[in-house]
């Protein structure tokens, strides 16, 4: 049993307050009637109305969502294939170089990655815009997917695949009907992680974007340099609400699966 001392309680309280008090203040001041974000002028939802009539903000948000969905999907496919290669094929020429290239974005600063991609696009003569941001985010997030899927494949029971192939299934059919359903939670977790990283990215998107391609983090950052407006508080509050809803739904789903698993184990034990 853990005993909480006064020092521990004060430390945890101060830590949580440091993390969540600014977020709470942001949410509160998003309902501020005054345009001055530091002066409370009464409760109002006018800034949410203004936000949904702000074409620039909505266009940036829609662009960010499209980039995140596309880059996360591509990164999930490539990252899963990379994880399979590293786990199933332990000996091939260039494996060390391949694994190093997969893990490099994990430890490389975003500034270096963004600058390298910028030089690549400029040297290749590629017009920067939507697709260059997608390629940059795919490069960034693919390694995270590979790590998540690889950790699941390392504990995978290969005898299940061998049994399927002994029954006549081809390797491709075995992968799609046996392997993929088993590692699907890890693949989905990698996709969600890649989606989150893409939605949150600012540095790499700044280097790889061009005229007419400005993501929501880029737009918010450019406006914050001129001063925080209530509309920024409103859009941040919406993002916080979306994330909180996703976390709550995921927690409820995990809890329900755990309860169902316990019921199945109890039913199986009673049947014996």
Image: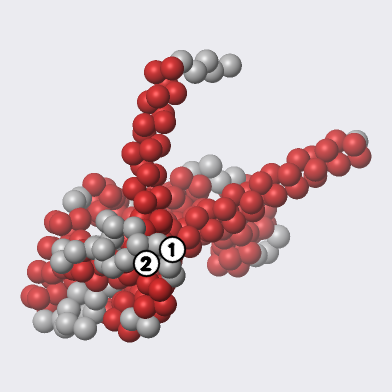
SS category of the residue bearing label 2? loop
Residue at horizontal 79 percent and vertical 40 percent from the top: 265
- Asked if residue 251 is positioned above or below residue 123 in the image, the reply reads above
- Asked if residue 70 is positioned above or below residue 18 in the image, the reply reads below
On the rendered structure, is 70 left or right of 227? right
Q: CA separation, marks 1 and 2?
A: 6 Å
Residue at horizontal 40 percent and vertical 24 percent from the top: 10
Residue 58 has which mark?
none
Q: Position of residue 100 (x, y in %)?
A: 25, 50
Q: 145 and 82: which one is in front?
A: 145
Instruction: Judge the density around disc 1: few (<14), some (14-19), many (≥20) Cα neighbours within 10 Å.
Output: few
On the rendered structure, is 97 left or right of 74? left
Residue lying furthest right: 271
Instruction: Residue 200: name its quadrant.
Output: bottom left
Work out whether mark 1 precedes mark 2 in sequence or the reverse, and give the earlier one: 2
Q: Position of residue 165 (x, y in %)?
A: 64, 59
Q: How many marks?
A: 2
Residue 33 has which mark?
2
On the rendered structure, is 31 left or right of 163? left
Q: Position of residue 51 (x, y in %)?
A: 37, 76
Q: Position of residue 155 (x, y in %)?
A: 53, 42
- The reply to whether residue 183 is in sight is no
Q: 38 and 233: which one is in front?
A: 38
Q: For mark 1, what is the residue?
A: 43
SS category of the residue bearing label 1? loop
- Which quadrant would the C terminus be assigned to in this image? top right
Residue at horizontal 86 percent and vertical 42 percent from the top: 267
- The reply to whether residue 38 is in sight is yes
Residue at horizontal 39 percent and vertical 44 percent from the top: 20
Is disc 1 in contact with disc 2, using a CB cutoff of under 8 Å? yes
């Amino acid at each position: 049993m853990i005993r909480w001392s006064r020092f521990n309680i004060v430390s945890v309280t101060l830590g949580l307050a440091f993390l969540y008090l600014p977020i709470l203040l942001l949410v509160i001041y998003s309902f501020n009637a005054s345009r001055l974000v530091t002066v409370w002028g009464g409760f109002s939802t006018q800034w949410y109305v203004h936000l949904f009539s702000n074409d620039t903000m909505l266009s940036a948000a829609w662009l960010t969502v499209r980039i995140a969905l596309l880059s996360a999907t591509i990164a999930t496919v490539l990252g899963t294939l990379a994880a399979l290669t590293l786990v199933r094929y332990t000996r091939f020429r260039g494996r060390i170089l391949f694994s190093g290239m997969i893990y490099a974005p994990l430890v490389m600063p975003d500034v270096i990655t963004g600058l390298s991609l910028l030089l690549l696009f400029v040297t290749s003569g590629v017009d920067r815009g939507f697709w260059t941001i997608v390629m940059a985010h795919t490069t960034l997030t693919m390694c995270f997917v590979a790590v998540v899927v690889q950790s699941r494949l390392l504990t995978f029971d290969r005898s299940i695949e061998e049994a399927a192939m002994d029954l006549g299934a081809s390797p491709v059919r075995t992968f799609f009907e046996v392997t993929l359903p088993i590692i699907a939670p890890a693949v989905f977790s990698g996709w969600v992680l890649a989606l989150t990283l893409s939605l949150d990215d600012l540095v790499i998107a700044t280097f790889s974007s061009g005229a007419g391609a400005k993501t929501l983090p880029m737009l918010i950052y450019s406006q914050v340099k001129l001063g925080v407006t209530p509309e920024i508080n409103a859009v941040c509050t919406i993002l916080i609400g979306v994330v909180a809803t996703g976390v709550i739904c995921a927690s409820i789903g995990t809890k329900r699966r755990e309860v169902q698993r316990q019921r199945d184990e109890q039913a199986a034990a009673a049947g014996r």
